[in-house]
Image (cartoon, helix red, strand yellow):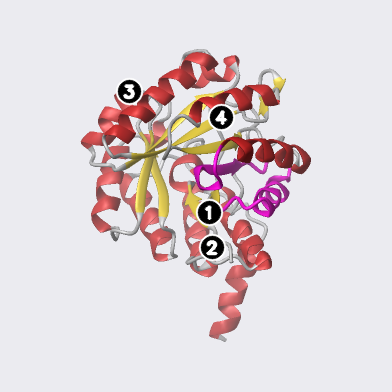
Amino acid sequence: MNSLLLREVAPRDGLQAEPVILDVDSRVQFCLELIAAGCRFIEVGAFVRSDKVPSMASSAEVCAQVQHAAADEVTVSALVPNGRGLVEARTAGLRHVALVAALSDPLARANLGRDAETSLREALKLASECLESRIACRLYLSASFHCPFLGDVPASYLEQALRQAALYPGLEVVISDTTGRASPLEVRRRMKMALDLLPPEQLSCHFHDTWGLGLANAWEAMQLGIERLDASAGGLGGCPYAPGAGGNLATEDLLSIARALRWSHEISPEKLAAAATRICHLLGHPARSRSGSAWLAQTKDAKE
């Protein structure tokens, strides 16, 4: 039986583009509710400039509080876009970080201040430093399918990046549909290519649901045996540097797929949907998942 190894990204990727800025206590409480729902991997913040991404200010404090409260089996991670961020993450005591490179020059310059080739080279240099220091890490390959500035990204760009990443055993590589424009057919093609270059335990997928294809794309990846998938409670998310990037694939919906495929996991969909509902109330809008209300209704029915 396959297992869904969820990477819950709502506290970081979900909140980073929200216009409402939550305080530290609200962010920590959200993380703890996700842990209580059974999430065992949570990306809780980002070590970035607060003037650029104000919603991620005080991420060091959020990380410290969540790590203090979380059990040993919970992986607490944060986004680290550069060397300075890695220093801050290590100072905060993190033992897992998420690195990022972009496969198109315009997105790399908008998001990271450098071209695509340099962004990958510097990210892999940080990965090497992390692995040598026994800090686990994953690498987002942004724009693995489509760039908001250039359009479709050639598969050869992804192939070249994967060949370089394959030189770093232990590095988890996240093939990321930053704009949500990937199709199930293209997901199948590119993930098959990825599986020819890396073992499945080193591969993850990160889908956005901008065009309503997040679920279909996740299904295709799961059919190929990809167990590590990013999702965001309530469908929260969007990239502040990628125009038009809508919310992430909702965790509640991914759990519905896992149930349909009979994949095992430790997460309570009802508790997670409740946590998503509460955080979205603070943000001033409803949750964007398709199945969240159904999971909550199931809880209500059980109580009655």
Residue name at image x 66 percent, y 61 percent:
257
Q: Are marks 3 and 1 in contact (CB under 8 Å)?
A: no
Q: Which residues are magenta?
A: 198-227
Q: Which residue is mark 1?
A: 233
Which label's residue is closer to the chain start, 4 or 1? Answer: 4
Q: Circle 4 sits in a helix, a strand or a loop, which is it?
A: helix
Which label's residue is closer to the chain start, 3 or 2? Answer: 3
Q: Which residue is mark 2?
A: 273
Tag nearer the camera, 2 or 4: 4
Of residues 252 and 117, the one nearer the viewer is: 117
| Amino acid type at mark 1 | Ala
Q: CA distance from mark 3 to mark 2?
A: 36 Å
| Amino acid type at mark 2 | Ala
Q: Which residue is mark 4?
A: 162
Image x and y of residue 201, in percent: 51, 48
Image x and y of residue 228, in percent: 53, 50
Q: Is residue 221 left or right of residue 198?
A: right
| Amino acid type at mark 3 | Gly
Q: CA distance from mark 4 to mark 1?
A: 28 Å
Q: Which residue is mark 3?
A: 83
Of residues 262 and 49, the one nearer the viewer is: 262
- Quarter of the image for the N terminus: give it: bottom right
Which label's residue is closer to the chain start, 2 or 1? Answer: 1
Label 3 crowd (10 A; few <14 / some 14-19 / many >=20): some
